[in-house]
Amino acid sequence: MPFRFFGMKLKEASGCAKVWVFRMYETVDQMFVRFGDLVLGWAATRSPGLEPWARVLLCVGPIAILFPLLFAATTWAERKLLARIQNRLGPNRVGPAGLLQPVADGLKTLTKEDIVPDRADKLIHALAPILVMVPAFLVLAVLPMGRNMTAANLHIGVLFFFAAGSISQIAVFMAGWGSRNKYSLLGGMRAIAQMVSYEIPFILSALTVVMVAGTLSTVEIVESQRLGLTVASDAGWLPRAVAHLANTVGGWYILQPWGVSGFLIYLIAGLAELNRSPFDIPEGESEIIAGHHTEYSGFKFALFFMSEYITMVAVCGLGATLFLGGWQGPRPLPSWAWFFLKVFALMALMIWVRGSFPRMRVDQLMAFAWKFLLPLSLVNVLAAGLWMYLPSRVAAWFLGGALMAGAYFGLCRLVRPGKTGPRHYHYA
Amino acid sequence: MRTAFILITFWTLASGLLAISRRNMIHCALALISFFAGIAALLFTLSADFLGAVQLLIYVGAISVLILFALLVTHDASRLGDRGAPFSRGKWSGWMLSALVFVVLGFGLHRVAVPPPPDPAPALPVAEIGRLLVTRHAVPFLAMALLLTAALVGSALVAIEESSEHARKE
């Protein structure tokens, strides 16, 4: 039966050209995967023992090359954007529009003297910047960066992301303790307290997606955000395009009531996990002179900086995977372009937040995590459960939305700012 | 895989030994964390991914932070660097007791007939583990959660009393 759109029967375009366009798209979309297959095939013909090593190299190599480059680009983009927000020019001396500034910064940090405090715990002080890079790169392994482009397709992907990410707290503590500097220790303790507190709403917001998708695998979560609408094969281009758009965009979890609130909680808790503004009290320059990396100079400092930005990319990547449909997007753009587009959009949002909000106080920070975000994310889990088990989607939409709105306004009313009096701080 | 297993085993054992033999309390705690991470790595090599990730999340991510906080909050931070002799006076009875436990456990394990591993290694999907936890084993699961919460609240109470004493002294 021919598909009718507003009563009109639309003509089909010539099949030959369509097939050609589709093939072109497939080639561009899968070009990295095909290149990898080529390398694997070549390795298999050379010697059978070479293939597993080639596989490992193909998984690790792109991440190890791409993300440090992305880090350089991010620092430039952040400085430019912040400058734009503050009505400045930003870096504009090295290269066109200051584009080579990261290179200059890299050379500077490489050639700087590596200063270790005299009374520092030398081994721990040296190990901390190395250890801080481990979780930053580990978590990238489970992000699906395009169709068939996941370094490690674990069936516990989301859990692995959070588990590996929790190593960074230890590295931050080691940096704070090993420096033998009270500001460093204060910053380290603040960072750990903050990360542990915000990890709970962070994980609970991701839990809603895991509940609804029914899987912990990041690849399957992305696939579960695709709708399965079909149109008749002889339908015209317009209904096809509409169906394609609905299939690739309509299933994103952010379009559901628990998804909106879950995404917002994820983003806020993610900012806190990253120790980024407005949650940057562990590194508050004006209070404790950069916290746990006060005593680091040269390339060790650059490593801390790098891990922070790579983790930022990873958190944005997981946010895009969980709530924004991962690599799914309407057609002319290939899947990997969609993924990185979403990641860049989220990073721009984080930079915008950094340029707009003042830093929080320590007591505000903890109260916000435990009294506001945690109950809100628990209610959000309830809303996701409603979405799963209510028979009518419309009812679930309104009930879930009302539940979240009620929880938000109720909590705003309930959580009064605490009385501030003289406070006695012992360690943090 | 076998090489990785052996390497990780040695790493875990070395961390465990460091954890009980260092004088610096923070070093002990960090060695203990390395030990936890080693156990997680062992679980990963044994392809118990879920357990490995949980071990990493709970022990390396949470318990270790608890230990570090407990160390820094309950001790005088300036004297944490030296806890005196790593072994106390009762070390010989301690060694004897642990040797006895080891012998008993070893004997017990030796007596157990190990069944041959089933040919396709049994894979329990994570979803199945979760389902079992909230259906068949719901009561022990909830009891454990209650126990942990009670322990947390209790430790918080102890810490609060201590800090209020601290404030009074000042």
Image (cartoon, rainbow, N blue to C red):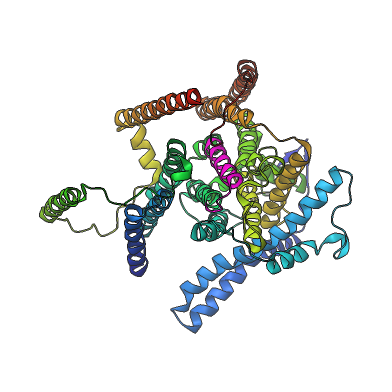
Closer-to-camera residue (A326/B55) = B55
The x and y percentages for residue A268 are: 64, 36
Q: Is residue A2 something that shows in the picture?
A: no
Tell me what residue is drawn at x 44 percent, y 45 percent.
B79
Does the magenta portion include A180? yes
Disc tally is 0
The x and y percentages for residue A111 are: 70, 69
Farthest residue, direction bottom:
A46
Closer-to-camera residue (B68/A244) = B68
Q: Which secondary structure type mostly characterizes the magenta part of the structure?
A: helix
Above or below residue A58? Residue B50 is above
The x and y percentages for residue A333 are: 73, 55
Farthest residue, direction front:
B170
Point out the image quarter for the C terminus of chain A. top right
Does the magenta portion include A67? no
Above or below residue A292? Residue A49 is below
Magenta region: A178-199
The x and y percentages for residue B143 are: 32, 28
Q: Is residue B8 left or right of residue B105?
A: right
Closer-to-camera residue (B3/A7) = B3
Q: Is residue A407 left or right of residue B43?
A: right
Point out the image quarter for the N terminus of chain A. top right
Q: Is residue B139 something that shows in the picture?
A: yes
- Determine the image quadrant of residue A297: bottom right
